[in-house]
Amino acid sequence: MTVHIGSIAPDFTQESTEGTIKFHDWIGNSWAVLFSHPKDFTPVCTTELGMVAKIKPEFEKRNVKVIALSVDDVASHKKWLSDIEQTQNAKMNYPILGDPDRKVSKLYDMIHPEANDTLTVRSVFIIDPNKKVRLTLTYPAATGRNFDEILRVIDSLQLTDKHSVATPANWKDGGDCVILPSITDPKVIADKFPKGHKELRPYLRMTPQPNK
Ligand code: BEZ
């Protein structure tokens, strides 16, 4: 099964460094970021896991839980934790799933055999409180992810769920937004966007971020 934007995130029960995780129950009413790592005791993964621990308050502010996965078992992850903490100056504060049976990796198509037939690629899934997948990203093993970008996407998703806007290229929280092309009635536009808007083209109308 392919996990697409709009799919219900496959549910699973799997062991983690913080005990057994029943995925949908663990998400509860939060958003979630599930991100995979090729292997324990590898350098890029060590930096990524430490980075996410350090910026976890940024995820919490947005009502997002984070959970990592690496194909090794939980006993191995637990040995790795102290390296992550010591080298990245971070206290690990979220679960890492073990996946020695590749159950979760297979469910989420995290193993790309043309890249490597046993290790996971660097996948990211952003999942909303309805358990719907809202973003998928895939990075190769040698490229660490930019977690500021993941926070930026969460800001966009949470904004565009509530307001009739989309976010343009390189948008960051607080930046001007695009009025959805489906909104054409001038009265509706005036009501929804009281701060005004600039019409660059009939389909390209910029407005200040509605909730700022
Ligand atoms: C790493 O995490 O550093 C890594 C893992 C697999 C291949 C290359 C790099």
Image: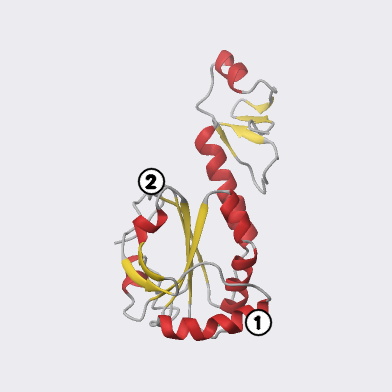
Between 135 and 82, the one nearer to me in the picture: 82
Q: Which residue is mark 2?
A: 130
Q: Position of residue 78 (x, y in %)?
A: 48, 82
User: Which residue is painted at 65% across and 82% down in the image?
Assistant: 86
Q: Position of residue 28 (x, y in %)?
A: 39, 51
Mark carried by residue 197: none
Q: Secondary structure at mark 2?
A: loop
Vertical position of residue 77 compared to residue 126: above or below? below
Q: Residue furthest top?
A: 187
Q: Secondary structure at mark 1?
A: helix
* Res. 3 in view: no
- The N terminus - image quarter: bottom left
* Res. 62 in view: yes
The reply, left or right, for residue 40 in relation to residue 208 is left
For label 1, the crowd category at 10 Å Cα-Cα, with few meaning under 14, some 14 to 19 and many 20 or more, is few
Three-letter amino acid code at the position of disc 2: Asn
Disc 1 Cβ-to-ligand 1 distance below 8 Å: no
User: Which residue is painted at 58% across and 57% down in the image?
Assistant: 150
Q: Which residue is mark 1?
A: 86
Three-letter amino acid code at the position of disc 1: Gln
Choose mark 2 or mark 1, whichever is in front: 1
Res 14 quadrant in image: bottom left
Res 184 quadrant in image: top right
Res 211 quadrant in image: top right
User: Which residue is painted at 31% across and 67% down in the image?
Assistant: 13
Q: Position of residue 83 (x, y in %)?
A: 60, 84
Vertical position of residue 38 compared to residue 184: above or below? below
- Mark earlier in primary sequence (2, 1): 1
Q: Position of residue 188 (x, y in %)?
A: 55, 17
User: How many marks can you see?
Assistant: 2
Q: How was the colour assigned to the protein in this rendering?
A: secondary structure
